[in-house]
Amino acid sequence: MSTDTTNTTEQKPLPPVNTLTKPFWDGCREGVLQIQFCNICDLPWFPPAEACPRCLQDDWEWRPISGHGAVWSWIRMWQQYFPGWSPDEYPYTVALIKLEEGPYMYSTLVDIDDKDVSCDLSVEVEFRTVNEEITLPVFRPSHGTTDR
Amino acid sequence: MTQTSRAELRNLQDKTAIVGVGTTQFGAIYRDLDPERSAYELGLIAFREALQDAGLKRSEVDGVIVSRLPHYGRMCEMIGLRHPRFVNVLPGEGRQSGIALQYAALAVANGLADVVACIYGNNGRSSGARYGGEDRGTTPQAMFEAPYGMTSPGAVTAMMFRRHQYRYGTTTEPLGHLAISNRANAALNPNAVMQRPITMDDYLGARYIAEPLSLLDYCLINDGGVCFIVTSAERARDLKHTPVLLHATSQASDITPVYVADDFWHEPMSQIADDLFAVSEAQREDLAFAKLYDNFTPTMLFTLEGMGFCEPGESADWITPERIGLHGELPLNTSGGHTSESYMQGWALHVEAVRQLRRECGDRQVADAQYGLYACAAPLATGHILKRDDR
């Protein structure tokens, strides 16, 4: 694979932090995975949105979630679409996690060889600091039970 | 949970027809990269050909729907249409080609326009489109995906296919059969971009893009323009070609924040199938061919299962070279589809359906084409049955 276009000085994409999403990133920095819940109907949702998709009301709050989920599916990305991944990082793993609370979240897997990954693998969140502002939630195989 | 099909769809049955089709030369311009090539120019070439094909005068066109072309004004200006009575713009995504036909048919059937030209132009290859990595986190979805390197329609399809493998034990071999079949058909299509036949070894040896999918599961990235012209069935009978009627059409959806659907879009595709086969006298066994949206080969598996050609999880066994080939029970993507003919986001599949029903397809013509299916499985899904009108 050609690496001519790889500019290793360029950073991996970072999420822009805005008023709506700031509590999510603040939580990650403190080691807490939280998503929005409707105060009227208790529906959780992700990614962030301005109102409950069921009630259509903006009476919601950020609530910590269990951090547990399962791998819905996963891929190994070989194609260089983004800057910031060095040649030796390919292929990298992307997983789609179905959170215990219901919503889905794209992420990656840590502490596991790709050969051991399978759909429906139980996982739990941990956090990887990127910079002062951004800490990314990632998922590792969960060894305990989900009821902590 | 399939809702009852909608009897009102009969109101559109056989009311409108595609009477003119045009496509640019996909293979020739693939080999002639031109950074200055505009999508509008490609749309213009296709429109000119479709108009001539229909035997219509430009002044008879009073409706225009453009897709992937950013502005209707520029297109209308370039094709000299100053006073159209029905105009719409659809984004450049594959889900929209079937919707363009639906809008055109609705407009014509309800008197908003007499003749609607649906025009698509795509200069993606010349302009360096990669279909991945463009959005580094600006949209509400991408900002939670790009930091992990998640991007591209191919990668979400790979996610769905991996899940299908896990759930049903599906191997990549049926995907190989689809890619090989598309290429074999393209070899009989002088206008196709990729004409060199491929083998299962080629398929299995192709480099990964988003594993488990590899290069030969992917659509091409190429330039081109497509146009189809829609008018009333009544009018169509006075024009030069055998009319191809929009016999049945339906739309359904499963819109999630992560694009994928846990049932591989079975629910929307089965709703569409229920609608189409409730309205039509033709059933699955009466279809001379199917044009299945093949941005990536697994999409065809999801479509076949969702539309009831086989049970969920059984498409891998259902797909055999004999069944899907030009002389098979259900020839698929006779032009070579998106993986071998041209990635025109469903538009060229519509044109191929028309040409097959007119029986103009030469070496790749299927026998006795009377009814044909178009279907696109996606978060926004469409399907039609087109019918040759022999009256």
Image (cartoon, rainbow, N blue to C red):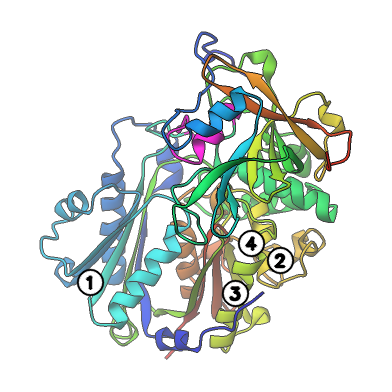
As measured in the structure, the alpha-carbon distance from the residue carrying label 4 to the one carrying label 1 is: 39 Å
Question: Is B98 situated left or right of A45 in this image?
Answer: left
The location of residue A60, given as percent across then percent down, is 51, 49
The location of residue B109, given as percent across then percent down, is 31, 82
Three-letter code for the amino acid on which mark 1 is drawn: Leu
Parent chain of label 2: B
**Magenta highlight on residue A9:** no
Q: Tell me the magenta residue range.
A: B130-149
Question: Looking at the image, is mark 2 or mark 1 earlier in the sequence?
Answer: 1
As measured in the structure, the alpha-carbon distance from the residue carrying label 4 to the one carrying label 3 is: 10 Å
Residue found at x 66% / y 79%: B284
Query: Which residue is disc 1 drawn over?
Result: B56
How busy is the neighbourhood of tag 1: few (under 14 within 10 Å), some, or many (20 plus)?
some
Query: Which residue is disc 2 drawn over?
Result: B305
Three-letter code for the amino acid on which mark 2 is drawn: Glu
How busy is the neighbourhood of tag 3: few (under 14 within 10 Å), some, or many (20 plus)?
many
Circle 2/circle 1 CB separation < 8 Å: no
